[in-house]
Image (cartoon, rainbow, N blue to C red):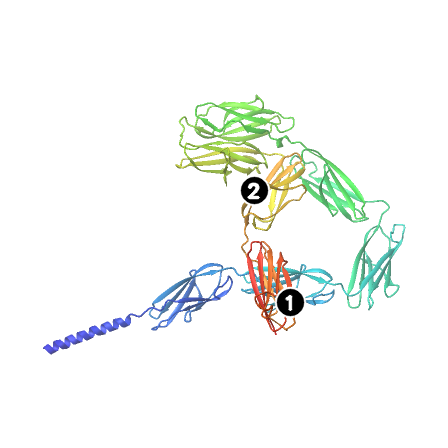
């Protein structure tokens, strides 16, 4: 019995031990934390990036996955290799490793991707280097980009060439034309970034033929001469064919000798174009154009003038059109004068000019001169009818926009006519909340019209004021009167306006308000027609904004004030902008964002002016910078001070009327290093000349300096490789700089190049040349 118990206990113990062993075997360890690597190590936007994940596990096969910014990557889950087309910005990369038992572990890293550098044009060459007319020129361009080139274009002047690609070398052919040309190279990478450069290509003349002399007899023909004999003397070793034409019509040309040809032409009136062309058997030719005039018995230079509309009214745009004709010679210039002042000049025979004349009589004068200096002029007179409705009365309130219920208040305004010979007939006051008449005033003292008003209700009461002149022309303004109840809440801020409620169109005005409170004011905000503007506090304690009155009509000036205890008051005050004779100006800028060193260019266009413009002033941050007296009124200045700025144009006519326009712009500091490329041969024979081509530029602020140092491994003694054998500094270099030196002995030459822009941003490059 005891033996049986011992055997039973042994079986139980063995079972427990086996169970413990099995439990230990099922506790499979996790794979190691994955390691993430990238190829290239520091990718730029647009590159194809290989993402590699590595891990290990002694008990299981592993399966990999990767995601960037939550988007899974395509690749091989068995090898841990994935691919991604990189994008600019900061990205989160998550790698996950999973074993056969579904145990997994992840790792996260951050990858910053910058924009790639622009494409690089390493070499621009052509053969022959000094072409002449008729030769075939081979252009060769080497271009590279870290993300690949998508397109390379070559143009001679404005004509595109057919480009052939061979690796990083791009070639094109061109049949040379004599003269100065511009080769334009444009390289686009796979992200669409374009780099462009240009260089001059000078082509010599065609080798033959040549025109030695070209004459005609008589030298100054008239209608009394029936014929003119043309004579050309040329040169070409292989002989030439001569062609002489007048106004595109070929003449019969005969040779007097191998170098002299003549042709006869029947005289006709006019300004004629003579074309002389010599061409040899190879197809090379030379062609020149001459001019000959035959004057008619009497001049027929004439001008026709018309205007649209024929009977302009006040404020109409008038278009003047003039046409000059002359059978004797082409028109050289036409000049338009309005009331004796020159408005425009053109070099064609058809003139068109649009302006807005003032009321009254005007004289249009057009003068023409042909290419033989014959002159004539023509006049046209017109009158702009007087329209009294275009001269509304001037109206200005003379009472504060506050009142109290039950307490009488005197409403006074100043009104005066603007139309000639007009008088103010009456001024009416209307409560707009219920369209009831407050009163009417016809008597005046020094232009002041008044009526009494006793408010019956509190709140903001809009009062419409109409002034009517003797032509029944009406001017109106609306005043918002803040009517307080008998018991006023003294805790809230009190706002009072401090500006003229009648403003001329196109004027530059200050809108102001006083803010008072028993408590400290925390903030003041202002709006004009619901557009927020930033107020400033002047020395008198008024809160002010500057505003250009570009649009006529009634406008709302809203002021909101809040104290430190959150007591807040918001009031709206109305003012009227009436049409005036001030110039209307538009301001155009070449950009609203500049880097320091950029050129700021702005032009003030006069959209409307009833009088001749005398000058235009340009202000930057309210400081006068320039005055221009002739159109186009253009302001130019180098961008200097970093920050936000305001440019304002002030147009002043001959009667000192002023119109305004303004624009905001920003100036930023250039922090981009200049572009730098250095080309030199990698090897050269001893005694050979090393030619180094350096290309550098900075679109933002320009290259300030270029420093070039050349070191030799064998000289100078005793400091080879330490003291440069050549050291040059170029101030404000051009895009391309060339240096050369003689490589002597068995040596290694290092060419160090440092380019700096106007803000000391720098780029560095080094090239090595080995003598063999």
Q: In what element is the residue under mark 2?
A: loop
Q: Of tags 2 and 1, which is closer to the observer?
A: 1
The residue identified by callout 2 is: 621
Percent position (x, y) of residue 752? Answer: 58, 64
Q: Which quarter of the figure has residue 741?
A: bottom right
Residue drawn at the location 58% of the way across and 70% of the way down: 713
Q: In this view, which residue lies farthest toward the front?
A: 718
The quadrant in which the N terminus is found is bottom left
Q: Residue at x 87, y 52 (%)?
A: 221
- Residue extending furthest toward the bottom: 3
- At a point 62% along the width and 56% down the height, the residue shown is 731
User: Where is residue 355 drawn, in percent x and y?
Assistant: 67, 40
Determine which of the numbered discs, if any, sits on residue 41 in the image: none
**Label 2 neighbourhood size at 10 Å, few (<14), some (14-19), many (20+)?**
few
The percent position of residue 189, horizontal first and vertical second, equals: 56, 62
Identify which residue, 376 or 626, lies in the foreground.
626
Residue, disc 1:
741
> Which residue occupies the extreme left position in the image?
1
Q: Residues within 10 Å of mark 1 (few under 14, many from 20)?
A: some
Distance Cα–Cα, label 2 vs label 1:
53 Å
Residue 291 in the image: above or below residue 314: below
Describe the element under mark 1 as helix, strand or loop. strand
Which mark is first along the chain, 1 or 2? 2
- Residue 192 visible, this orientation: no
Residue 311 appears anywhere in the view: yes
Q: How many callouts does the rendering have?
A: 2
Q: Quadrant of the image for the C terminus?
A: bottom right
Q: Position of residue 48 (x, y in %)?
A: 50, 65
């Amino acid at each position: 019995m005891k033996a049986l118990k011992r055997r039973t206990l042994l079986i139980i113990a063995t079972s427990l031990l086996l169970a413990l062993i099995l439990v230990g075997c099922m506790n499979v360890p996790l794979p190691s934390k994955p390691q993430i690597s990238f190829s290239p190590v520091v990718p730029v936007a647009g590159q194809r990036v290989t993402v590699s994940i590595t891990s290990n596990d002694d008990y299981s096969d592993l399966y990999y996955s990767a995601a960037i910014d939550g988007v899974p990557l395509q690749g091989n889950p068995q090898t841990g290799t994935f691919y991604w087309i990189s994008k600019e910005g900061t990205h989160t990369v998550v790698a996950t490793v999973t074993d056969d038992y579904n145990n997994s572990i992840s790792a996260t890293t951050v990858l910053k991707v910058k924009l790639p550098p622009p494409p690089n044009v390493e070499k621009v060459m052509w053969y022959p280097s000094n072409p002449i007319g008729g030769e075939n020129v081979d252009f060769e361009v080497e271009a590279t980009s870290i993300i690949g080139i998508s397109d390379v274009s070559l143009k001679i002047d404005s004509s595109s060439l057919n480009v052939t690609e061979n690796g990083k070398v791009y070639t094109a052919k061109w049949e040379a034309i004599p003269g100065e040309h511009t080769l334009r190279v444009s390289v686009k990478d796979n992200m669409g970034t374009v780099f462009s450069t240009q260089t001059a290509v000078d082509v010599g003349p065609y080798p033959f033929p040549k025109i030695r002399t070209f004459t005609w007899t008589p030298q100054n023909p008239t209608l009394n001469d029936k014929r003119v004999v043309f004579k050309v003397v040329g040169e070409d070793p292989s002989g030439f064919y001569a062609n002489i034409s007048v106004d595109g019509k070929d003449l019969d040309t005969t040779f007097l000798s191998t170098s002299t040809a003549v042709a006869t032409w029947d005289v006709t009136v006019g300004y004629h174009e003579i074309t002389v062309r010599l061409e040899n058997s190879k197809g090379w030719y030379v062609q020149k154009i001459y001019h000959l005039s035959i004057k008619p018995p009497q001049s027929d230079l004439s001008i026709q003038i018309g205007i649209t509309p024929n009977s302009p009214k006040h404020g109409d745009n008038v278009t003047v059109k003039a046409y000059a004709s002359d059978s004797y010679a082409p028109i050289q210039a036409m000049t338009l004068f309005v009331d004796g002042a020159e408005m425009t000049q053109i070099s064609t025979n058809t003139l068109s000019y649009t302006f807005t004349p003032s009321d009254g009589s005007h004289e249009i004068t057009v003068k023409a001169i042909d290419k033989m200096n014959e002159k004539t002029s023509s006049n046209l007179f017109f009158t702009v009818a007087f329209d009294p409705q275009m001269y509304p009365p001037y109206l200005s309130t003379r009472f504060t926009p506050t009142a109290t219920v039950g307490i009488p208040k005197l409403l006074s305004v100043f009104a005066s006519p603007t139309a000639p010979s007009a008088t103010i007939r009456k001024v009416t006051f209307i409560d707009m909340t219920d369209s009831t008449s407050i009163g009417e005033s016809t008597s005046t003292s020094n232009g002041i019209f008044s009526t009494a008003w006793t408010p019956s209700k509190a709140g903001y009461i809009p009062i419409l004021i109409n002034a009517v002149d003797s032509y029944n022309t009406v001017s109106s303004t609306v005043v918002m009167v803040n009517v307080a109840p008998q018991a006023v809440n003294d805790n809230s801020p009190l706002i009072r306006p401090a500006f003229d409620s009648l403003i001329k169109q196109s004027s530059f005005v200050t809108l102001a308000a006083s803010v008072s409170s028993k408590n400290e004011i925390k903030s003041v905000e202002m709006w004009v027609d619901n557009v927020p503007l930033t107020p400033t506090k002047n020395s008198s304690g008024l809160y002010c904004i500057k505003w250009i009155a570009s649009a006529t009509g009634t406008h709302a000036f809203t002021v909101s004030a809040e104290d430190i205890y959150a007591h807040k008051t918001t009031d709206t005050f109305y003012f009227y902008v009436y049409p005036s004779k001030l110039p209307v100006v538009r301001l155009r800028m070449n950009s609203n964002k500049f880097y320091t060193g950029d050129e700021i260019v702005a032009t003030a266009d006069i959209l409307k002016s009833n009088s001749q413009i005398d000058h235009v002033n340009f202000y930057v941050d309210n400081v006068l910078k320039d005055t221009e007296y002739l159109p186009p009124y253009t302001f130019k200045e180098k961008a200097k001070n970093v920050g936000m700025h305001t440019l304002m144009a002030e147009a002043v006519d001959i009667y000192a009327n002023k119109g305004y326009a303004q624009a905001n712009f920003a100036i930023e500091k250039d922090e981009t290093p200049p572009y730098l490329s250095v080309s030199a041969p990698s090897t050269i024979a001893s005694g050979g000349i090393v030619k180094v081509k350096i290309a550098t530029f900075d679109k933002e602020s320009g290259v300030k300096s270029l420093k070039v140092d050349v070191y030799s491994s064998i000289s100078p003694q005793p400091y080879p490789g330490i003291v440069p054998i050549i050291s040059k500094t170029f101030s404000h270099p051009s895009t391309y700089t060339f240096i050369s030196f003689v490589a002597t002995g068995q040596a290694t030459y290092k060419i160090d190049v440092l380019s700096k822009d106007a803000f000391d941003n720098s780029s560095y490059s080094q090239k090595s040349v080995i003598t063999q």
